[in-house]
Structures are given as C-alpha cells and as structure tokens.
Amino acid sequence: MPQPIGNPKPPLPDPDRRRAQELVTRLVAIPGQWGQESKVAAQVIDHLRAAGVPQRNILRDRAHKKSPFGGECGNLIVPLAGSPGRTREPRRMLMAHLDTVPLAVGCRPGQRGRRLVSANQSTALGGDNRSGSAAILVALLELLERRLPHPPLTLLWTVQEEVGLCGARFVDQRKLGRPAMAFNFDGGDPGRLTLGATGAYRMAIHVQGLAAHAGLHPEHGVSATAIAALAIADLSRGGWHGLVEHRGVRGTSNVGVIQGGDATNVVTDRLMLRAEARSHDRRLRHRIVQEYRRAFAAAAREVRNHKGQRGSVRFDITHDYESYRLKESEPSVVEARRAAEALGLKVSYRVADGGLDANWTNAHGIPTVSLGCGQHEIHTTKEYLDLDEFHVGCRLALRLACGV
C-alpha cells in the first residue's frame, strides 16, 4: 500500500454510519431542483453551525446573479485553516452540487434493503447529488468533532449543476483560498475515478415564420414547423444528429426541446428549439454547431409562401463547458487513488461523456478528480442510492479531507 505523504498520521475512524444515513435521507427529502437550492443549503448551514464552524467561515457567493437562469442562492463555501503543524500543506477542496433534477421534487425517501429509494414512484430519489453533498458534510463533521489533524481545506457546495454547471462556472474564486487540488463527489462506484469529461455547447434556436389560417389560406403562411422539420431531417441524414462520427472522432448532438404553436388551424409562425452538441474534441463540437447553422439556414431559404416570402432563424449559443483530461500522475489523481486503495477498493479510471462541475474547476486551474458515492439510475424514477457505497464515499471524503 502506498505510504502517506509527510509525517505518519494516526489511522482514521470510520464515520458514524447511522448519522450519515440519517443525514443523506434528510437531504434527499428537501425539494431543491436547480435554481431552488436555498432550503437544502440552509440545512447544510445548520449542521455547520452546530458543529462549531464560525460564521465568518460560512461564505456565500453570487453565482446565481451571473447565471442566465437566475436562482435563489449562490454557492456555499467553507474555507478552513490547516491544523497546527500542517498549515503549509497544499490546500484541498472537497465539493459536490446541491441541486437535483426536477424529477426528484416530491421524493419521499424510504429504504429497500441496503438501498435508499423514493417511496413516491413518480419521482427520482435525488441522490444525484444529495449523496455527494452529504458525504463531504459527514467528512467535515467527523473531522471537527474528533479534532482530526488536516491540511488547509475548502468545502464547496455548488448550485445549478444540472442546468449547465452554472454554480461551478461562476464561483467566486477569491473565496476558495487557492486550492491546489480538488475532489468532486458525484457518481456511483467509489473506486471509479473520473479523470476527464466531454465539452458541450447549448443552442437555443429561434425560428420565425409567418402566420396564416391553415384551413382557408395555408399558402399565405410560412411554417416555422416545416423549417425546423426540414433542418432536423437534413442533420439526421448527414450524420450530425444523434451519434456523430467524423474523421475518426466521435461526438453527439440532440434537439431536446421544441416549443411553439397555439392551434392546429394556424400556420406556426414561431418555434423555439433547444439543442446541444458534445464531444471531447473541440473542433468537432464547433463543426456540429456549424452544421446546425447551415441546416436551419438552408431550410429557411427553402420554405416560402405563395408570394415568395421566407422565414428566418436566430441562434443563441452558449459554451456550457470545456472538455478536460487529467494525467494519472497529477497529484489530485495520485491522492484520490491512494485514498481509495487504502480502503481496499479496486481503482479504475474513466472519462465521462457528460459534464461535471469538475469541467469548470479544472478550467479555473484547480485539478479536480470526481469520485462516486453510491448513485445509480440517476435522473429516472428507478434511481437508488447504494448505502454501502455511500458509506465508502463518506470514508473516502474523510480520508481526503485529512490528507492521509
């Protein structure tokens, strides 16, 4: 087993299993989809204050004011000095996001064997990512109550991860204390370390047509629906929608939302579509967006009314997050592997095809590894939290917080 860096340190106690389970159960029961995290943040703050964290160390930023989605509150940040004799060690950051997907609103947590599930069968559990939020809170509570030696630490609970990583993107970096490495708790298998993730663009596509009575004079109208349909068919035929494979590089794109129209007897004059493009390759992501622009522009030129009038298309494009890939020799990766192996875990590495808060913390210059904490079947009504894996996640968080 690899030896700890620095002076020998005493073995760590296991976090209290019962308290950890009660805490995560309490957190998943609190409604708090993206943009509505204030109640769950308040619960975390209550635990911090009860554990003796000074008010001056419980910080909030204004990330929600910079987010295009607004929101109730910003990120929750808790910077702590290192223990005596360890103040000069590199600062570590443990992080997780507070928000859930809307499907988790209304969850009634219940236990089924060694799984935490939603007793309300119409909702998800919200273990993504209340389990990560609970794991780092458990670690902090154990560290403080047992007065365990630790390096300088920052705990970060982000908001609006599920809607584009907005909390991590707009975090006030001045409040973080300049961490040298970070560990993001968000995933399933605790021994599976995520070293990289894809990048993504988000597109809002506004199609403008011309209304007309669809029963009397449809030829007077310009159908925004027809423009969109032609464009999507063009993208699908050309291999730019769905799985995208181009010159040996892979990516994906999807039109996920289409909104518009008021009645079947009116030629649709306005349509709004929301789409995304993902790839680990920056050039392919850009090419996918270009193909979307081309297809919609061509469709707008093709659809005309009896007078030759045409519609128009406008794109609003957001760079959601940039891809990243950490080397196995990166200190944060080495520390995460060391902690996992110390718990007897079989360690594996992965690169995610979805976005993580780590995309933005890595972009901010903080090498960040993501670790699992028991989440499974996320974003579905079949979601569950493996309580044994969750407890391992809590143990990992405590070990990484203490730097042993």
Image (spheres, rainbow, N blue to C red):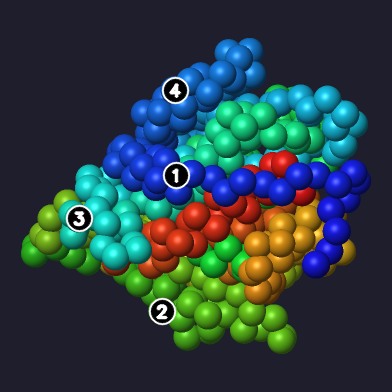
The disc placed on residue 233 is 2
Mark 4 and mark 2: span between their CA atoms?
A: 53 Å
Q: Residue at x 36, y 28 (%)?
A: 39
- Tag 3: amino acid: Ala
x, y percent for residue 66: 57, 30
Q: Which of labels 4 and 2 is toward the front?
A: 4
**Closer to the camera, 256 or 176?**
176
Q: Earlier in the sequence, mark 2 or mark 1?
A: 1
Circle 4 residues within 10 Å: few <14, some 14–19, many ≥20: few
Question: Badge 4 is on which residue?
Answer: 46
Label 1, label 4: how far apart the Cα atoms are:
15 Å
- Tell me if residue 325 can be seen: yes
- Alpha-carbon span between mark 3 and mark 1: 20 Å
The answer to which of 251 and 229 lies nearer the viewer is: 251
Q: Earlier in the sequence, mark 3 or mark 2?
A: 3
Q: How many marks?
A: 4
- Circle 3 sits on which residue? 119
Task: Decide: few, some or many residues near mark 1? Use Cα within 10 Å; few <14, some 14-19, many ≥20.
Answer: many
Determine which of the numbered discs, if any, sits on residue 20 in the image.
1
Which tag, 3 or 4, sits closer to the chain's start?
4
